[in-house]
Amino acid sequence: MRVDNYKVVHWLNTRKVTTGQVAETIGMDHAQLEKLLASEDEWPDEVAAALARALQITPEQLVASGRSEATVLVRTAQELRDTRRAIQRDGIHFYNYYTMAAPQGAVAPVILDILCPADRVPQLNNGHLEPAITINLGPGDIHGRWGEELGEATWQVIKANAEADNWIVGDSYVEPSYCPHSYSLASDAPARIVSYTGQSALAGLMEDVNDWSDPAARAMLGWLDESLTPQQVAVLLLARRGHTLESAAVRLGVRETDLVAALDQGTAELLRALGTTLGFDYRLLIQPATRHDAVGKTFKDIAECRAETRNFQGYQVTSMASAPHLPDLTGLFLRVAGDSGASLCEPAETHYLVSAGSLTLHWTGSYGSDEQAELGVDASAWVAPFVTHRWSGDGALIKLGSGRHLDYLDLYELTNTYAAVSTLRRGRRDNRGWGYDS
């Protein structure tokens, strides 16, 4: 079993046991355990299982991720085609799926051939937990469907760009979790889409809730009651601290009606004082902004993209659809002309698809070396977070990102963390025990 020794040390520290104590518990020689912790050798399965039992965790919680220190991964157009999967739905050949470059175990964007004919209303899928950003690659237009009843929000043409500036390849939109959706052609012209189902910020919570009892899950859902207002959040946070709205107002020296009004109106000064005094982040009490239609999707057409075209770091770019309630899903159309593009460095993993021309990706490798790869149409690349890279040549790209570190929740947490840099520096590959003699 491939054990992550850093995870072992973390759990030893969490459980407040020394290496000597855990060695005695599992009936192992202390020096042998120390040797395993100091090496990269695989652990005997029986030792890993015994250690997991001693730490009151599952063996899976100690398994190494298997992810390498890769900075960039590239997939050629032929390698993309080799990933083709034919999908049947509603009795017909409905899609072909292809997967873009990504590390093993990571979410990757997919390309779909849209095969459902224009004279047929496409059968809906059931949606999925992960929110998604979707772009029409053309060359034809497609129909999008997002509900049983066809209407303005549930039946819409997603157009491709047939004009000279077709580096902006087509319309785009983002969709929320569990939004049923499906696509068909809008004419005899073939069409494809690229869809990126980025990781859901709720995934960790959902995994935990799956293990809750039914009464506990029902209690949480009843508390949510389809809407989560600042006042509901405040009551929850206050109750954990033994406060009501009334007693919290007394603690602040204000009237309860003033505190309720501040929650309803988002009065930052009073809410900041409430959070600072009672020990929670007042930003949770600010009503978030929304920008979506009746089924939760946010659409952006070619004309809007064209109007927002701008120069950025030596590239011509324009933004795809985005939404404040899905802040980690980002997309850019990017035009490369020559060798004038400056270096880019993203806080989260980035996916690229070459949509036109011939381009060269330059990047800094794992050991500081200068690396490059020449990519044609339909080639894709995955770039790890904080890896310096740039593009040269003559062509166009679709650039997609989700929140696989740093996501907006990471940033939220880091802004709250005391000595954030020191904490991360200590925590990365931490193999120090918790400071007691073994």
Image (tube, grey):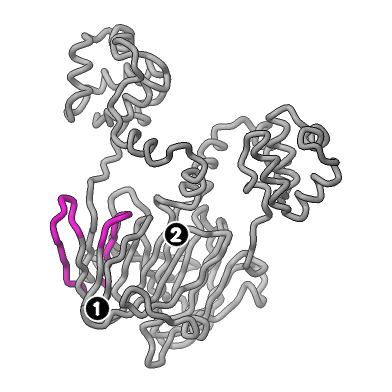
Horizontal and vertical percent for residue 78? 21, 70
Q: Which amino acid is tagged 2? A: Thr
Q: Secondary structure at mark 1?
A: loop
Horizontal and vertical percent for residue 32? 18, 14
Residue 422 counted in the magenta span = no
First to last magenta residue range: 364-388
Q: Which of the image's four quarters has the C terminus?
A: top left
Q: For label 1, count other residues whose C-alpha is less than 10 Å away and answer few (under 14), some (14-19) or many (20+).
A: some
Q: Secondary structure at mark 2?
A: strand
How many labels, in total? Answer: 2
Q: For label 2, count other residues whose C-alpha is less than 10 Å away and answer few (under 14), some (14-19) or many (20+).
A: many
Front in this rendered view, residue 25 or 183:
25
Residue occupied by mark 2: 197
Residue at 39%, 85% in the rendered image: 139
Image-quadrant location for residue 234: top right
Q: Is residue 312 visible?
A: yes
Residue found at the very far front of the displayed protein = 253
Distance from the alpha carbon under mark 2 to that under mark 1: 32 Å
Horizontal and vertical percent for residue 381? 27, 64
Q: Is residue 310 left or right of residue 2?
A: right
Q: Which of the image's four quarters has the N terminus?
A: top left
Residue found at the very far bottom of the displayed protein = 164
Say above or below: 412 vs 354. Answer: above
Residue at 67%, 52% in the rendered image: 286
Image-quadrant location for residue 294: bottom right
Residue occupied by mark 1: 340
